[in-house]
Image (cartoon, coloured by chain):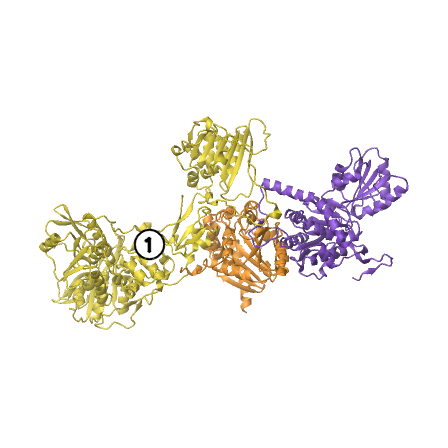
Chain colours: A purple, B yellow, C orange
Amino acid sequence: MPAERDGDEHAVTAELLSANHAAATAAALAGRANRAGRGFGGGVYPITPQSECIELLCRQEIEKGRIVRVESEHSAMAVCMGFSLAGARAFTASSSNGLAYMAENVFAAAMYRLPIVMMAVNRTLGPPWNIWVDHGDTLMLRDSGWIQFYCEDNQEVLDTILLAYRLAEDARVLLPALVCQDAFVLSHTMAQTEVPDQAAVDRFLPPLDLPHRLRDRAVTVGGLDLPHETEVHRRQLEDALRRVPSVHAECQTAFEQVFGRRPADAVVPYRMEDARIAVVSMGTTAATVRRAVDEARAGGQPVGGLRVRMFRPFPELQLAHALAGIERIAVLDRDISLGHGGVLWSELRGAAPRGALVQNYVLGLGGGDIRPEHVSWVIDDLRARCAAGAPEMMEVA
Amino acid sequence: MEIRLHGRGGQGGVTCAKILATTYARLGKHVQTFGDYAGERSGAPVRAYTRVEDRPITNRNKVYRPDHLIVLDQNLLGADTIEGLRTGGDLLLNTPRPMEELNGQFPAYRLAAVDATAIARRHGIGTRSVVIVNTTIAGAFARLREIPLPVLEAAYRALGLLSNFPAAREAYEAVQVRQATDACAAPAAGTAPAARPPVEPVEAHVESPPTGLRTGTWSSQRPRYVEHLAPCNAWCPAGNDVVGFVQAVAVRGEEAAAAVLAKSSPLPGTCGRVCPAPCMEGCNRAEYDGAVNIRGIERWISDHAPAPSRAAPAGLRPLSIAVVGGGPAGLAAAHSLALLGHRARVFEGERELGGILVTGIPAYRLPRDVVRREVARILDLGVEARCGEFLSAERLREIAREHDGLVLATGLQAPRPAGVRGDHLAGVEQGIAFLHRVNLGEGARLEGRVVVLGGGNTAMDCARSALRLGAARVTVAYRRTRQEMPAIREEIEEAEREGVEILLQRQPVGFRGNGRLQSVDLAEVDMGEPDASGRRRPVVTARVASLACDRALLALGQSADRGFLPPGWELRGQQVFEDGRPLPAFAAGDFATGDGTVAHAIGSGRRAATLLLRALGRELELFERPERSLAVPATDIRFDHFERRAAAPDRHVGESVHAGSFGEVALGLPDGLESHRCFSCGHCTHCDTCLVYCPEGVVRRAGPDYDLDYAYCKGCGICVHECPRSGMEMSTP
Amino acid sequence: MHEPLLAGFPTAGRRRTEPVLRPGNTNCGGCGMSIAFQMLDRALEDRAIQMVIPACCAIVTPGQYPRSAYGVPVVASTFASAAALATGLAQVAQVNGDPVRVLCWAGDGGTFDIGMATLSAAAERDEDILYVCYDNEIYGNTGGQRSSATPLGAVTTTTPRGKDVRKKDIVGILAAHRVPYAATVSLAHPEDALRKMRHALDAHGFRFLHVLSPCPTGWKSEPAEGIELVRLAVRSGLFPVYEVFEGTRTVINVEPELSAEALERYLGMQNRFRGDRLDLARVSESIRADWKRLRRLAKEVEA
């Protein structure tokens, strides 16, 4: 695809890409970067709204790369595990029910400490069938041991996939990473996206040297654990996830050195400096929140926005830091843990300052279009409350 | 009350715990029962638990401080097994060991022992290699805890295990108990577990060491290599190592086989021609695709490999033994004695050694040069021959005085007469006398029709010799049916092929003639009820027909002539006694037993030689014929391991019999390949079947043999079951 | 060494020091899968392999982490995933020029049932994988439930009166994928088994071996009689020994007797066939029908 030239005076080399294509482009760049290693591979299976990603990937020429067109998401992840265990860099993409079907192997990939990167387009779980965005599908996998990123724009999708490989493959981490983007809002929306050249990506992503890749030695990967072994193995997984924030920071710096821009932090604040009210969200909702915050600020209200970009490991410290001194917190969940409330809300409550009012708003399920006025209504509602209530199920569509 | 069970996967420990819980529930208690669930495999150590309380049970933990312990396999008994058992508690052990052997052990507990495995096996519970002892040992536990049998029985019924209850009852009766003797002797109760080794992270796990799991303890049985009696060996009257020489041909060649044969038989060339081969009757291959042609193989060996001369072993002062009679029994005795380093002197009435081999068996069956070759080999061993003197009683006494011992093997001298009207007529002759004449070259031409009376080998020899001497027509008349003819089957077939007619169920009742035989009266015979020998008794009828003939040869059997024994000598068994006192003199062969074949004579001669040496104070193993019933039965041979292949038949001269031609008729086998058909019953051939099928890979080649790694062998028994030839067995270590 | 059946068999030299399956594994005594591993071990000689084993008895076999009874590299996959995970390994081996042969070693549950889609897909893609199914006709690892490989009449914990439908024709299914090689393997015919394993190891593309694996625990039979049972299954015609090349050329390797004696002994030696739904006539009829079809396939090649 020829690069679009921006008419702007700050002429940037950017391509007009959908986030699906941005993801495929990043995967191909990362894949080629391992040609000096054991190569690259992926198992791919179509599902709306992710299919464009794997279609583009299947059109890529990747030296020492193999894309396997499997029969299910379950096998897509199994193939990735095979690629990864053999020392190759592995990638797949999925969405919604596909992730649910894949789930068993999603867990297995983490248990085996395989630095697979998966792009997930967040889509509502059916039936009844609904192809539009919500976050319930990937949040279902929050306990799997995967690192989870939720992106806000096309560039972030591309950058985060490259970053995720560096982070996942770090010897201190060795965990799979999930890079999420909102269905259609990102996946099918074209936007200017800077595509780095291969040489730069090669510098950023050295060949993968998986310490436990299968060689010719007698080893059984995944035999039987007794309770004690499982206790320790779970702790080791947990420890690895807890090392992610510091390694992530190193990766951000390295990324900036190579590509000249710094990927966002695990938690992204907006006008939080003197705020007493915070609106917390994930994914593209955060952009809408920024608009609403600006409006509220214009009305003199001390409101700030917080985007949770990395959901696993959960950035509890960063959140606690960002929320220090905040009195009222609105948590926008584009998901629901049925019988309880929003997933982000339930996790964030622990990081909220003592005495703060934390109210959950579940909105935008099934792709309902979250507009700034919805966020403004949230802010008004929050300000009017004397105490937190049950999660507020909002209808926006 | 907490009960812990230690068993092995497949023994049914969890079910046992369930039986106990069910029983206590019927007694009105609150119960709980559960097992350790893991990757249990048949034989792997597993635990199960039963908890019994008067009140509802709140504890959901495993049992760490059991009141009572049940150990389903004594090999599981170790510190970790009895860990935590409360002082004075019951320790019930499944063991074959009697209480006396266990008495000093586990003084802190009330010790109870029962051989539940044996009981369960008797009741057929489980499989042969994995006996399920749960339902049995529960009976013993009921006894210890004074649970009434009817309550226990009700529990078995409730669990659908009633068919196993008799075994439980037996264990209830059989369990032995010893009270705790030293309450202070209990090991300290389990403390905090020792520090564990670090758990390797998944991403650092690049090599898996072996498990070291000693699966050899999983089974109470293990295989081993054992030689079993081959039926051919059991059936050989001469005591030859038949499977040994047949396998030697197959694997190591004729010379090695000849060496095997030479240890037992002085006359392989003879037996290879004239033996009725009981070994072939016993041969298990007969049940599959035809017996191995063992006789042919023996002949092949004898004709193609010279028997090695064996130096007599050095040792005690050699004895000098007189062997009276140079037939097969005498030669075998002399041969045995010579092999054992003694001096044997053979006295033979005829001009040359061989006895019946030269005087009785026609040359077309047994060429004279074969006999001479075998005799020469015997003499090579240092045996001395004195021929041409028939001994008087006086001379016999003298010889006995001159030697350390005596073997009497003069064979059968007295032919049975016909005992009917006209048997004195000229032209009626004893077949044995006829053959003697013919074989020593004194034979005359025959003419006309010859009738041979009898159905044994002598009859066939007479008939076929008569044909060769010019008889126009030869008829054999036998009083029973063809199946009962004692002659070797092939001899009968050969005779018929050569033109001999056989009349069955005919008994001579008289000879007619005017000074000279003109006809024989033959009565028809009906077959009656079986007699003591199992053969149907012939019933002579009044239906008589006359058969015109010029010569009648009587082959009705012979008996030993003991008339030449000095006065006062008598035979008791094989030994000779003089006025009631045993002499160092033993009878052999037909003279002793009348069994009638060369092979029997050899066996008998060998036995006489060993009996005599024993009597003379020498220590040695008596030659004994093995018990046929101990031989490997055909059902223990895995026929599927062998390709079907018909037995190789002996070759024969093609042309018909010419008058005067006494050349050998049967030519034997073209090669030794028939030996490859041998199953080698009971004798390992290193065929690798055990190795190929071993699921554990613990059968390994070790030099020419195999090594079994008992540390890991699970005792499944496939190697034993699949052994094509019963060269292995399961045993209890 | 004059046993025509096994001549030269175990003497095959090799430099590998480790067996595929080490002693000290946790399989039951007399396990057919273990025997199959010993056969594979001999077939391998010096070939390097990597094995993928889905959840089944064979992944309990190695024992407790970090130790293992396997002497070769092994990856445990989730139940349905063996052929997919192996695909990844095989593809990486290919792009890197590694000579290693990638195997799947799966039970009937992981092959006939839950792994069927994965297996079918890998076969369709003609991945460079040797897939070995050790078929004990039961979910043995979970305690003996019926699978779609459980034969007509067999009692399992989930078919207490005996299964009333027939097992899948798995080799037929694979042959319909036109894979380069699909064959049945009788453990009672070691020469044939060895030949097929070597052929399958050296061929490229997707190869499939179906091994009838006696299971004393699940079949309720004597551990010592496992090989005998396989032999009887072959003799009776219940387990045809044949191979299919490229999905078209069918070759019968062992002629069965199709005898009632063999069938009755086979069924009689296993307590799993003591159910009241065992219909001997129906079993015999199914054998006849199978052989009629098989012979037609074999004949088509000759024609």
> Residue A61: where, in percent of width, then height?
71, 62
Q: How many marks?
A: 1
Q: Quadrant of residue B93?
A: top left
Residue A65 picture location, percent across and down? 67, 59
Task: Please tell me in which quadrant of the rendered image residue C143 appears.
Answer: top right
- Name the one closer to the observer, B423 or B279: B279
Q: Quadrant of residue C261?
A: bottom left
> Which class describes the residues within 10 Å of circle 1: few (<14), some (14-19), or many (20+)?
many
Q: Residue furthest left?
A: B394
Question: Which amino acid type is shown beneath numbered disc 1?
Answer: Pro
Residue toward you, C191 or C260: C191
Residue A158 visible, this orientation: yes
Q: Identify the secondary structure beneath mark 1.
A: helix
Of all chains, the one bearing label 1 is B
| Outermost residue, right side | A299
Q: Which residue is mark 1?
A: B231
Q: Residue B166's x, y, as percent?
A: 44, 36
Q: Quadrant of the N terminus of chain A?
A: bottom right
Residue at (32%, 57%) from the top-left corner?
Answer: B244
Residue B35 in picture, x, y percent from top left: 55, 37
Front residue (pair C277, B259): B259
User: Which residue ends up furthest to the front in the rendered image?
Assistant: A257
Q: Relative to B560, is A396 on the left or the right?
A: right
Residue B142 vs C94, above or below: the answer is above
Q: Is residue B157 visible?
A: no
- Residue in the foreground of this view, choosing between B401 and B267: B401
